[in-house]
Image (spheres, rainbow, N blue to C red):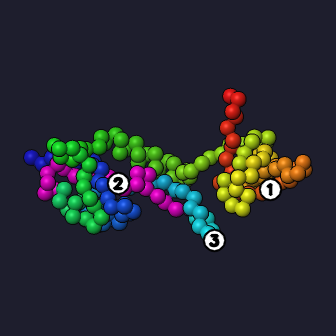
Amino acid sequence: MKDNPLWFALLTRSNFEQTVYSRISKKKIDAFLPTTRKLSKRKDRKLMIEIPLFPGYVFVKSTRAPADQLPILKTLGAVRLLGNSAGPVPVPEHQIESLKLLTSVAQDLITGRIIDLKKGDPVIILEGPMAGLKGEFFEYRGRGRVIIKVDLLNRYAGVETDSDNVERIPDLLS
């Protein structure tokens, strides 16, 4: 009698998740690499990139039989199946199904900071030539840009910057 296949978490070498996933899939073994999208800032541009939801892990379906797990472990970049002294520990099927549902529905979600600012909120600029400058949030400009009202020599000036570079200063009195 053959064991029922179960899902296992496979530890991979750093940044080898996609390689391991592709090679295991080519071996006709069920594999799942949950990913999410992230805005990546380069010096000259911004890109939307896909990154693993769990860096360093790929989920694979296999039986508990060592002969069935060997092709998985022989894959370039695969390290080991997660487990304990008794052997690899399976991931419950419902958790994998939940991850599949989450990643299919939320594929357009972007990981990272989401700021919800109201006019007058105290903010600080985190990066760029004006890093450390404090002011008040004034308005959203669109395309990820915001206007910050800054007090300079008792005069107010509007500074436009990326919304990623701005963080709300928490209220100290609350």
Q: Which residue is mark 2?
A: 57
Question: Is the residue under label 1 in contact with that under label 3 (CB below 8 Å)?
Answer: no
Q: Amino acid at mark 3?
A: Asp
Which residue corresponds to the image point at 17% horizontal and 59% vertical from the top-left? 70
Which residue corresponds to the image point at 70% horizontal and 29% vertical from the top-left? 173
Q: Amino acid at mark 1?
A: Val
Q: Is residue 30 magenta?
A: no
Q: Which residue is mark 1?
A: 159
Camera-side mark, 3 or 1: 1
Q: Quadrant of residue 116?
A: top right
Compare marks 2 and 3 and give the one earlier in the sequence. 3
Compare marks 3 and 1 and give the one earlier in the sequence. 3
- Residues in magenta? 48-68
How far apart are the alpha carbons under marks 2 and 3? 31 Å
Asked if residue 140 can be seen in this view, the reply is no
Residue neighbourhood size for the residue with mark 3, other residues' Cα within 10 Å, grouped as few (<14), some (14–19), many (≥20): few
Which residue corresponds to the image point at 23% horizontal and 46% vertical from the top-left? 83
Q: Mark 3: which secondary structure?
A: loop
Q: Amino acid at mark 2?
A: Tyr
